[in-house]
Amino acid sequence: MNDVPPTTHGTAPGGLEPHRGTLILVLGILSLVLCGFFTGIPAWIMGKGDLAKIKDGMMDPEGEGTTKAGMICGMICCIITAVSLAIVLFIVILGGGLAALNG
């Protein structure tokens, strides 16, 4: 009989949970290029959770760099989008106020 336990495809070396660094990086880049909040927020949330798991030793630490990069891209996109929306909202409110004064 073989004493070696069967390998499972859902674990990284050492029995750790496999990292999702590539997925998070793709989501972060997509948020910057095309999708905005729709992929930026998931990249930020997933990255934060995965980095906590890596820190606690439950996830494969090999993906730490790509996870951080993807999370930072998601954060940058969310911040830029929020600031842009605030500026547009300010301009709309200012324009409405000026129109009321001149009308």
Image: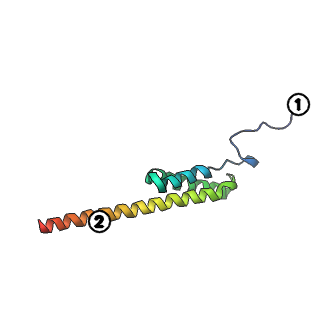
Quadrant (top left, top right, bottom left, bottom right) of the C terminus: bottom left
- Amino acid residing under circle 1: Met
| Residue 10 placement, left or right of 31 | right
Residue 12: give x, y in percent of width and height: 71, 47
- Can residue 8 be seen here? The reply is yes
Please identify the quarter of the rendering in which residue 81 is found.
bottom left
Furthest-left residue in view?
A: 103
Residue 40: give x, y in percent of width and height: 48, 54
Q: Nearer the viewer, residue 91 or 20?
A: 91
Cα gap from disc 1 to disc 2, whole angstroms: 73 Å
Please identify the quarter of the rendering in which residue 83 is found.
bottom left
> Dot 2 lies on which element?
helix
Q: Residue at x 22, y 65 (%)?
A: 95
Q: Which residue is mark 1?
A: 1
Alpha-carbon neighbours of circle 2 within 10 Å: few (<14), some, or many (≥20)?
A: few
Q: Which mark is residue 30?
A: none
Q: Residue at x 62, y 56 (%)?
A: 66
Q: Which residue is mark 2?
A: 90
- Can residue 51 be seen here? The reply is no
> Dot 1 lies on which element?
loop
Residue 84: give x, y in percent of width and height: 37, 62
- Amino acid residing under circle 2: Phe
| Residue 85 placement, left or right of 27 | left
Residue 71: give x, y in percent of width and height: 55, 58
Alpha-carbon neighbours of circle 1 within 10 Å: few (<14), some, or many (≥20)?
A: few
| Residue 77 placement, left or right of 84 | right
Furthest-front residue in view?
A: 33
Residue 83 higher or lower than 24, as above or below: below
